[in-house]
Every structure is written in C-alpha cells, then in structure tokens.
Image (tube, rainbow, N blue to C red):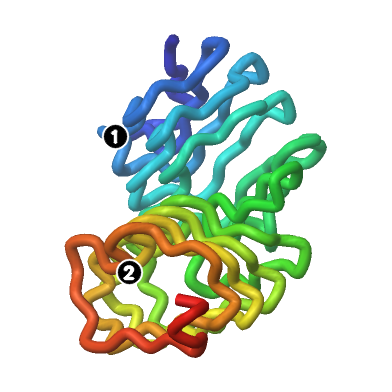
Amino acid sequence: WGTSTISEGLKQITITGEGELPSLSLEACQSTEIVILDDRITSLASQSLYAMYSLKEVYLSDNIEFIGTYNFTVCPLLEKIHLDNNSKYEVIDNAKGLVNKQTKTLMFAAKDLIIPSFVERIGSYAYHSSTIETLTIPENILYIDAYAFNNCSKLVELNLPTTLKEIGESAFNKCNALPFIVLPASLEKIGLSLAGNGTYRKLCYYGSMDMW
C-alpha cells in the first residue's frame, strides 16, 4: 500500500494498492478533502473511510465488490462519492446515501437523505453518529439491522413504518434524546435491547398480546 501526495498538506491523496483497503488506514488524514482510490482496490474494510472531518470527495473504483460498515459516516463535509458504473452499489444524490442494490440495503445515510423506494433494509451503522433530529421511515422498509441508528444523540422523533418486520439488536443504541419508540403490529422479530447502552422513556406496541 502507498499514498501519493498530489497537493500540499495532504488536501488530496491517491491510495495505491490492490485488494482490501484496511480499517482506519486514513485515520490521521484529518485535513484531507479528496481521496482517490486505485482501480485495483476492490474492498473497503469497516471504517476504511470513517470520521474524516474535512473529506469532501471520494473517487471509488467501479470494481468495488465490498464496502464494510461505518464507511462515510462522521464525514460531515462529504459532498460527492464518485461511483458511476458499479453493478452492486449505488450512490444516492451525490453523497447523501449508499445502497447495496443486490440486497436493497441502505449502507450509509446522510441526515437529509430521502430513502429511495427500492430500499428494503436499513443496514448496520447506516446512520451512525448522524445529527438527524426527526425521521419518518418509508413504508418500503421491512428490516432495520443491528446498531442502524447507533449514537444518533440528537434524534427526538422517529416514525416506523407499518410494514416493518424486523428490528436488530441495539438498533437505537445511545439515542438518548428519543423519548419513546412506537413499534408497529407488523413486527415479527425484535433483537435484544433496542436502546443498547442508551435510554428511552417509553415503548409502545400496536399489536396484541398474542402477537407479541
């Protein structure tokens, strides 16, 4: 692996190599605004491109085959993810979201994302540490994975769809500003400890005791 400095102060870097980009490999690049990945890089490990506070643009190879959790989260200035002709992943509205088209899973979501109608699952850590305050999840969402809303500390209002079938473990971990969670009667499976290490004051369920 190597990096090639294209402009002074690491404002723009190119990552060379092949295979998987390791976790936290750019952790120290807090002044970097543009990242360009080698066409031979086919996988992003969890947290490969994570918590880069100055990051504005990312150029991914169309050969990308796997993108792990946390990627692109806690990158508040991100404006553009370049990924044009990939068979597996699709970028939504420049950099507001990233979707695995094969599994119909939302991998990453900016706070102002309008969730596309073809998405059926909100993936693990998709909204990690988002500053989102209110969210109405559309009726096309059937599954919310574990830790999907991890550390959304400003979330105060959440409306779940009446079509929702499953909520994963600690899906709302550390969402401490959320006063209550209303669970739809459509739910078939709920993971352990919805709030994880967080707290909420009230849990409401619209189904019957037999359904619970």
**Looking at the image, residue 198 lies above or below residue 28:** below
Query: How many tags in the picture?
Result: 2
Q: What residue is pinned by disc 2?
A: 152
Say few, some or many: other residues with alpha carbon within 10 Å of mark 1 (under 14 / 14 to 19 / 20 or more). few
Residue 146 placement, left or right of 103: left
Q: Quadrant of residue 65?
A: top right
Figure quadrant of residue 67: top right
Residue name at image x 18 percent, y 62 percent: 197
Q: Nearer the viewer, mark 2 or mark 1?
A: 2
Q: Position of residue 98 (x, y in %)?
A: 62, 51
At a point 26% along the width and 33% down the height, the residue shown is: 28
Q: Nearer the viewer, residue 100 or 39?
A: 100
Q: Secondary structure at mark 2?
A: loop
Q: Amino acid type of disc 1? A: Glu
Nearer to us in this view, 46 or 202: 202
* Residue drawn 77% across the image and 62% down it: 118
- On the question of residue 128 being in view, the answer is no
Residue for badge 1: 27
- The secondary element bearing badge 1 is classed as loop
Q: Are marks 2 and 1 in contact (CB under 8 Å)?
A: no
Using residue 187 as the reference point, say whether residue 48 is left or right of it: left
Image quadrant in which the N terminus is located:
top left
Q: Position of residue 141 (x, y in %)?
A: 64, 68
Q: Is residue 50 left or right of residue 113?
A: left
Q: In this view of the protein, can residue 87 be seen by the observer? A: yes
Amino acid type of the residue that numbered disc 2 sits on in the rendered structure: Cys
Q: Where residue 142 is drawn, which disc sits there?
A: none
Q: Is residue 137 left or right of residue 181?
A: right
- Compare residues 1 and 10 and report the one nearer the observer: 1
Task: Rate crowding at label 2 as few (under 14), some (14 to 19) or many (20 or more) other CA atoms within 10 Å.
Answer: many
- Classify the position of the C terminus by image quarter: bottom left
